[in-house]
Image (tube, rainbow, N blue to C red):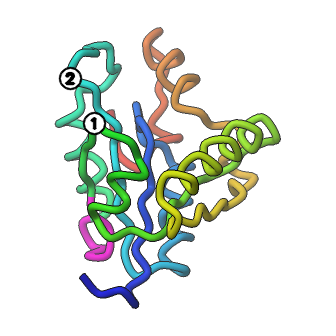
Amino acid sequence: MDNNKRVALFPGSFDPFTKGHEDIVLRGLKLFDQIIIAIGYNSQKQNRYIEIDRMIGLIEKSFANEERVSVITYNELTAGLAHKTGARFLLRGLRNTTDFEFENSVSQMNRYLFKELETVFLITSPTYAAISSSIIREVHKYGADVNEFLPYEL
């Protein structure tokens, strides 16, 4: 493991992975040598809207031309995964102050668990600030076209 390599973990459920998420990754590539998109997975929960293997494939296809981006799944503490993968940074997007309040608390706990872990927050680009996975799921569930908000087609 190269300690000088700036590896960031971008954790989330990504159900689905939106253009807002893609924007955070693309902007993060200007700061980091490698970004690992880590999809949190709990084998006891079968209530994902988009099946996890399909989501992995869609994200990988979206970044097929970017060798510095990889996609994994995990079912453990994010800080532990960061330590295992050699990631010294967590990459997070913030849409609003509500996101900040939640992410700040999570960041503090991750830092407690893994002292070398820094969380880097990027403010969501205005174009994508209103996009959330839960809204996309709800709109798609009722048959509306959501492809404009996704870096792939559902």
What amino acid does circle 1 point to? Asn
Question: Disc 1 vs disc 2: Cβ atoms closer than 8 Å?
Answer: yes
Q: CA distance from mark 1 to mark 2?
A: 8 Å
Viewer-closest of 20 and 8: 8
Per the image, the residue denoted by label 2 is: 43
Rendered view: 42 above or below 110: above
Q: Residue furthest top?
A: 142
* Residues packed near mark 1 inside 10 Å, few (<14), some (14 to 19) or many (20 plus): few
103 left or right of 20? Answer: right
Q: Quadrant of the N terminus?
A: bottom left
122 left or right of 6? Answer: right
Asked if the magenta segment contains residue 74, the reply would be no
Q: Quadrant of the C terminus?
A: top left
Residue at 44% from the left image edge and 41% from the top image edge = 12
Does dot 1 land on a helix, a strand or a loop? loop
Residue at 43% from the left image edge and 81% from the top image edge = 6
Per the image, the residue denoted by label 1 is: 75
- Magenta range: 64-70
112 left or right of 5? Answer: right
Q: Position of residue 138 (x, y in %)?
A: 52, 15
What amino acid does circle 2 point to? Ser
Q: Position of residue 23 (x, y in %)?
A: 55, 59
